[in-house]
Image (tube, helix red, strand yellow):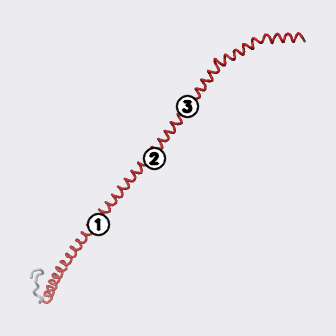
């Protein structure tokens, strides 16, 4: 058993330089590779997060501009609709005025035509009464005359 312990002691004594070299290598790795690598990764992460924040801010600004644009567009459309409605009302009033003027002129012409027709009717009635009286007297004269002598109609 002593031999095993002695060999074990020698192995431990022989492994001390390896352990020291391993610790030294770990320290060098930590200072030369691991810490700079952690610093670079942290810097990259901060830049990435910063870029992401900047992108989010840009997106928010773009959404705000889009909302403002939409609002302006709605206001412009509303103004256009109001102007169109005002023009439509104005045109409707103008049309109503012209219709009233045309109706008034037509009624005036109708009244004038009725008056003309009435005067033509009265004149025609007068002519017809005079003609009917003349024809009646001619018929009476023709009927009352002796049978042998007949006057010509239209020539008294």
Closest to the observer: 132 or 141?
132
- Labels 3, 1: front one: 3
Q: What residue is rendered at 44% in x and 48% in y?
A: 74
Q: Give the secondary structure at mark 3.
A: helix
Q: Position of residue 24 (x, y in %)?
A: 70, 14
Residue 15 position by quadrant: top right
The crowding category of the residue bearing disc 3, from other C-alpha atoms within 10 Å (few below 14, some 14 to 19, many at least 20), is: few
Gap between marks 3 and 1 measured at Cα: 78 Å
> Which image quadrant: the N terminus?
top right
Q: Position of residue 120 (x, y in %)?
A: 19, 75
Relative to 47, is 113 on the left or the right? left
The crowding category of the residue bearing disc 2, from other C-alpha atoms within 10 Å (few below 14, some 14 to 19, many at least 20), is: few
Q: Which residue is mark 2?
A: 71
Q: Using the image, tell me which numbered label, if any, was put on residue 127.
A: none
Q: Using the image, tell me which numbered label, if any, was put on residue 50.
A: 3
Residue 51 position by quadrant: top right
Q: Is residue 140 above or below residue 27?
A: below
Gap between marks 2 and 1 measured at Cα: 47 Å
The crowding category of the residue bearing disc 1, from other C-alpha atoms within 10 Å (few below 14, some 14 to 19, many at least 20), is: few
Q: What residue is rendered at 21% in x and 77% in y?
A: 121
Q: Residue lying furthest right in this view?
A: 1
Q: Which residue is mark 1?
A: 103
Gap between marks 3 and 2 measured at Cα: 31 Å
């Amino acid at each position: 058993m002593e031999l095993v312990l002695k060999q074990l002691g020698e192995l431990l004594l022989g492994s001390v330089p390896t352990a020291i070299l391993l610790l030294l290598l770990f320290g060098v790795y930590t200072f030369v590779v691991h810490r700079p690598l952690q610093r670079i990764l942290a810097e990259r992460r901060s830049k990435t997060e910063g870029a992401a924040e900047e992108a989010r801010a840009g997106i928010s600004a773009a959404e705000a501009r889009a909302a403002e644009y939409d609002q302006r567009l709605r206001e412009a459309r509303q103004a256009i609709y109001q102007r169109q409605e005002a023009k439509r009302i104005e045109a409707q009033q103008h049309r109503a005025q012209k219709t009233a003027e045309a109706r008034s002129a037509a009624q005036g012409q109708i009244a004038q035509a009725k008056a003309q027709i009435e005067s033509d009717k009265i004149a025609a009635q007068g002519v017809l009464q005079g003609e009917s009286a003349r024809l009646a007297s001619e018929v009476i004269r023709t009927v009352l005359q002796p049978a042998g002598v007949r006057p010509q109609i239209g020539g008294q």
